[in-house]
Amino acid sequence: MMIARRLFLAVPFLLAAPVLAQDIPADISGTYKVEGRNPDGSAYNGQLTVQESTGGAVAFAWIVAKQSYAGVGVRDGRVVTVDWGADTPVVYVVMPGGELHGTWAGGTALERARK
């Protein structure tokens, strides 16, 4: 009886798992609006272009405050780590619905990218 009850309670979660996985885009390529906080706490915004290749590499190009930045990342499931020439990478998490939430400057700065 106890096993049947546990199985009954677990079924909704098992059925929901494929739905949640579908919310994560297979390809994150596109143009995003970015909003962020610099390490000093000041705000910034700009544009991000992402191009994901079939080989696993992901190209990033930012335009922020009339400055251009570029990097190449590697996606591992929901996590994308981007080498953009700084001492530490930008690390994004691909959120359900496709937003990218990231940190940079060793975790002292934040960025959110939305299509």
Image: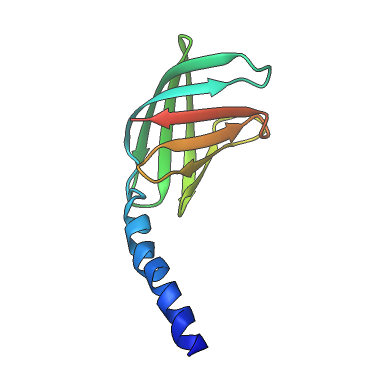
Dividing the picture into quadrants, the one containing residue 33 is top left
Q: Name the residue at 68% across, 29% down.
A: 108
Q: Name the residue at 42% across, 46% down.
A: 57
Relative to residue 37, is residue 1 drawn left or right? left
The colour scheme is: rainbow
Relative to residue 111, is residue 25 drawn left or right? left
The residue lying toward the viewer, choosing from 56 and 44, is 44
The image shows a total of numbered marks equal to 0
Relative to residue 106, is residue 33 drawn left or right? left
Q: Which residue, as the protein is rendered here, is positioned at the far front? A: 1
Q: Which residue, as the protein is rendered here, is positioned at the far top? A: 66
The residue lying toward the viewer, choosing from 29 and 107, is 107
Where does residue 78 sit, x and y in percent of width and height? 46, 50
Q: Which residue, as the protein is rendered here, is positioned at the far bottom? A: 1
Where does residue 5 sit, x and y in percent of width and height? 46, 82
Dividing the picture into quadrants, the one containing residue 114 is top left
Q: Quadrant of the C terminus?
A: top left
Where does residue 14 sit, x and y in percent of width and height? 39, 70
Where does residue 39 sit, x and y in percent of width and height? 67, 22
Q: Name the residue at 33% across, 50% down.
A: 23
- Eyeballing the image, is 56 above or below 92? below
- Eyeballing the image, is 72 above or below 42? below
Q: Name the residue at 49% across, 36% down.
A: 101
